[in-house]
Image: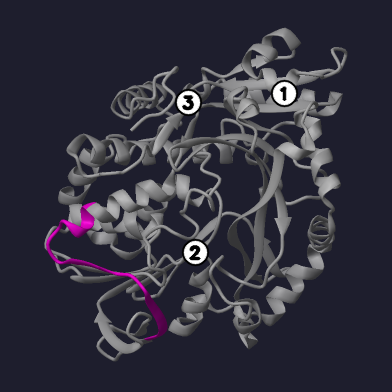
């Protein structure tokens, strides 16, 4: 079976790291080159401070279970995301067991995932959501309560000072996680650097991509340390550069990329500086997004392990910048607008005026208004204990649509060249958590024959024991692989900081 042997991965984040590891396990002799604009691996969207780190498993994120017009709850997306996260854990467990995931700090922690709502309509929704999810093995351990005393045992900080007559609804999954994707990224790339024929180039800015007549890609870049212009050639290119992927896809000129645009949104959080308060809360608690707000705006009071230290964040609050990356240029958005995507972007803008209004309101909020939202979750919060920080930058996908002209899409999307020599990953959440599933999709798109071969199937099965089977349909298998990854990753309930 003939394989493309030189792979170039643009961007040293969780996606390129995951794809690089999969490729090296499947094709040990392959030559892999990774190029990153910054001087550090995993320093943009994958960095712990720039990534929510929830380990999106749909245990607590209510935006993954929308309510249908008939009042029922659609759990299909939650099932898919939860299944994908289980795949990620399987690969991490495999690498950790073999010593192929070295990290200087813990990369995954055991933490409750909870949903918290108030108001009759929201409580009814949460009860229906709970009833639907617990029918599946991956959600069978979910607990539901409206009892103040019970909830106070789970999240005492949020119940202090709360009106005892207020009706609340809460779900709890004790097997949730907090994930440091920056640590995982650096661990995987550290492993790749020990492999033959793998090179990692930091401080390299890719300026242009051109496909040659023989099918190879000519990649032009600048070494930002020496200011030297370089040209390299590759059989296959993966663009996993976060918000920087869209401009690079445009430079590649693949027809499949026409009609795509992007709209950048930054996230801000209130960070707690009171150690006594931080110690009193140990959970990721998600609420329900306000009416008219985008899915990624779901408020949450979030315990994190960042740089080996426990932290407490609340948010997100939307911000706006024309940059596509936190370390990008203010010209990113205007320079991304071209003839092929100007109409889809305008059409999507007209259809989403409520989101524009929401974004403007968020940007114009004063500190006191931000704090009022926090008080709904933590009634006894003190203003002086919190400071506003800016997290990562995300670019939401705008896609050409025959009916609407252009639509705004949340989540991630893979765009591949017709000859399968180039793949681009666009979009955002829950990307990092489902990185293994997404990269398997890249392999399926670009190497269909190899993915169908017994050799690759067997190797993938070794890395991801549930590969090729449904964790949604096969509840027994789901629990088996979860028990195994829980043991290897030391995610038993009660462990706080885990390797």
> Who is closer to the viewer here, 198 or 212?
198
Give the answer, above or below, for where 101 lies relative to 445. above
Magenta segment: 191-209
Percent coordinates x, y for residue 251 in the rendering = 47, 84
Q: Position of residue 64 (x, y in %)?
A: 63, 40
Q: Position of residue 284 (x, y in %)?
A: 59, 31
**Discs 3/1, front:** 1
Q: Secondary structure at mark 3?
A: helix
Helix, strand or loop under label 1? helix
Tell me, for residue 158, which label it has, or none: 1
Q: Are marks 2 and 3 in contact (CB under 8 Å)?
A: no
Question: Which one is in front in this view, the residue at disc 2 or the one at disc 3?
Answer: 2
For the residues labelled 3 and 1, the Cα–Cα distance comes to 27 Å
User: What residue is pinned by disc 2?
Assistant: 242
Q: Residues within 10 Å of mark 3 (few under 14, many from 20)?
A: many
Task: From the image, tell me which residue sits under label 3.
Answer: 138
Cβ atoms under marks 1 and 2 closer than 8 Å: no
**Residue appearing at x 45%, y 46% in the figure:** 434
Residue 314 at least partly seen: yes
**Residue drawn at the location 65% of the way across and 66% of the way down:** 264
Q: Is residue 340 left or right of residue 146?
A: left
């Amino acid at each position: 079976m003939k394989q493309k042997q030189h792979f170039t991965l643009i961007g040293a984040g969780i996606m390129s790291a995951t794809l690089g590891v999969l490729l090296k396990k499947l094709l040990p002799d392959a030559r892999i080159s990774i190029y990153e604009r910054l001087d550090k691996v995993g320093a943009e969207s994958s960095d712990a401070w720039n990534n929510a780190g929830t380990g999106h498993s749909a245990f607590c994120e209510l935006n993954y279970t929308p309510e249908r017009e008939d009042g029922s709850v659609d759990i299909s997306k939650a099932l898919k995301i939860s299944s994908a996260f289980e795949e990620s854990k399987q690969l991490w467990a495999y690498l950790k067991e073999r010593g192929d995931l070295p990290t200087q700090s813990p990369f995954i922690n055991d933490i409750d995932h909870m949903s918290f709502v108030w108001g009759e309509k929201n409580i009814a929704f949460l009860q229906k959501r709970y009833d639907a999810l617990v029918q599946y093995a991956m959600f069978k351990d979910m607990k539901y309560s409206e009892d103040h005393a019970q909830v106070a045992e789970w999240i005492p900080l949020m119940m202090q000072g709360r009106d005892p007559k207020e009706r609340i609804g809460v779900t709890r999954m004790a097997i949730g996680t907090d994930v440091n994707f920056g640590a995982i990224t650096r661990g995987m790339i550290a492993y790749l650097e020990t492999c033959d024929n793998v090179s990692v180039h930091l401080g390299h800015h890719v300026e242009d991509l051109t496909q040659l007549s023989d099918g190879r890609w000519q990649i032009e870049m600048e070494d930002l340390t020496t200011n030297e212009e370089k040209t390299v050639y590759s059989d296959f290119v993966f663009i996993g550069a976060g918000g920087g992927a869209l401009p690079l896809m445009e430079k590649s000129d693949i027809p499949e990329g026409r009609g795509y645009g992007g709209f950048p949104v930054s996230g801000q959080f209130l960070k707690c500086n009171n150690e006594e308060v931080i110690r009193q809360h140990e959970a990721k608690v998600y609420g329900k997004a306000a009416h008219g707000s985008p899915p990624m705006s779901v408020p949450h009071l979030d315990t994190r392990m960042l740089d080996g230290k426990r932290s407490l964040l609340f948010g997100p609050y939307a911000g706006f910048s024309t940059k596509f990356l936190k370390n990008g240029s203010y010209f990113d958005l205007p320079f991304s607008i071209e003839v092929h995507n100007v109409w889809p972007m305008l059409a999507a803008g007209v259809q989403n005026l409520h989101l524009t209004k929401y974004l403007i309101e968020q940007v114009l909020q004063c500190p006191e208004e931000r704090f009022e939202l926090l008080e709904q979750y933590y009634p006894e919060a003190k203003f002086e204990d919190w400071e506003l920080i800016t997290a990562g930058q995300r670019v939401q996908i705008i896609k050409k649509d025959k009916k609407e002209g252009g639509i705004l899409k949340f989540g991630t999307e893979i765009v591949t060249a017709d000859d399968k020599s180039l793949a681009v990953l666009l979009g955002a959440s829950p990307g990092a958590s489902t990185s293994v599933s997404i990269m398997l999709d890249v392999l399926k798109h670009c190497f269909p024959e190899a993915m169908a071969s017994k050799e690759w199937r067997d190797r993938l099965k070794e890395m991801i024991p549930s590969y090729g089977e449904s964790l949604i349909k096969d509840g027994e298998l789901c629990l088996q692989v979860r028990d195994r990854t829980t043991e290897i990753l030391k995610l038993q309930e009660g462990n706080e900081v885990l390797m």
